[in-house]
Image: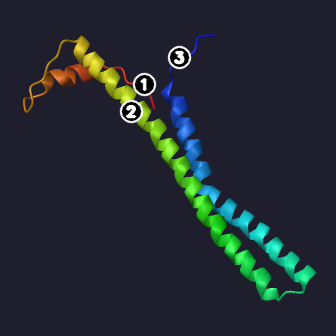
Amino acid sequence: MTVQYDPKVIYKFAERLYKQAASIAAKYALLGLLLCGGIGTGLVLIENAPVFLAVMFAGIGLIVGAIIGDEYGFKLRLQAQQALCQVKIEEHVRFAATVHAAGITAQPGSASVPLVQAASAYSAPLS
């Protein structure tokens, strides 16, 4: 089996990371709420602590879980951006190689008609 470069795989990977990042903060907030709320409820039942303690533990767990989840979601979005950046770098390098292979040189500030011709010869991968 021959493995070949396919940017569609990277785009799909980035989409999945963004979908996962969109819901991760809520999942962590719920997890924090349940864990800390459970601890608070246990203290109320076992130690006869005030019920407000269970509510306070649940609220703190909710906030801390949301903060941790948001940070994790940011890391997932950053990972997606890094993957997309690598695809764009590859596309630009492939275009530059096409221009170089065609022997086209452009002077800064000059009309870039030869570059348009090179761009039409360039076969960019479909995204």
**Residue 88 numbered tag:** 2
Helix, strand or loop for disc 1? loop
Residue 62 rendering spot, x and y as whole percentages = 68, 71
In contact (CB < 8 Å): disc 1 and disc 3: no
Left or right, 7 with reference to 40: left
Residue 72 rendering spot, x and y as whole percentages = 59, 54
Helix, strand or loop for disc 2? helix
Q: Is residue 61 above or below residue 83?
A: below
- Residue 99 visible in this rendered orientation of the protein: yes
Please report whichever mark, 2 or 3, sits nearer to the chain's N-terminal start: 3
**Residue placed at 42% from the left, 25% from the top?**
125
Please report whichever mark, 2 or 1, sits nearer to the chain's N-terminal start: 2
Location of residue 66 by image quarter? bottom right
What amino acid is labelled 3 in the image? Answer: Gln
Location of residue 41 by image quarter? bottom right
Considering depth in this image, is 109 or 59 the residue closer to the camera?
59
Q: The N terminus is located in which quarter?
A: top right
For marks 2 and 1, give the CA distance: 11 Å
Q: Is residue 74 above or below residue 26?
A: above
Left or right, 103 with reference to 68: left
Location of residue 29 by image quarter? bottom right
Where is mark 3, residue-wise? 4
Q: How is the image coloured?
A: rainbow
Residue 86 rendering spot, x and y as whole percentages = 43, 32
Helix, strand or loop for disc 3? loop
Tag nearer the camera, 1 or 3? 3
Q: Is residue 122 above or below residue 58?
A: above
Spot the residue most to the front: 47
**Residue 43 numbered tag:** none
Where is mark 1, residue-wise? 125
What amino acid is labelled 1 in the image? Answer: Pro
Say few, some or many: other residues with alpha carbon within 10 Å of mark 2 (under 14 / 14 to 19 / 20 or more). few
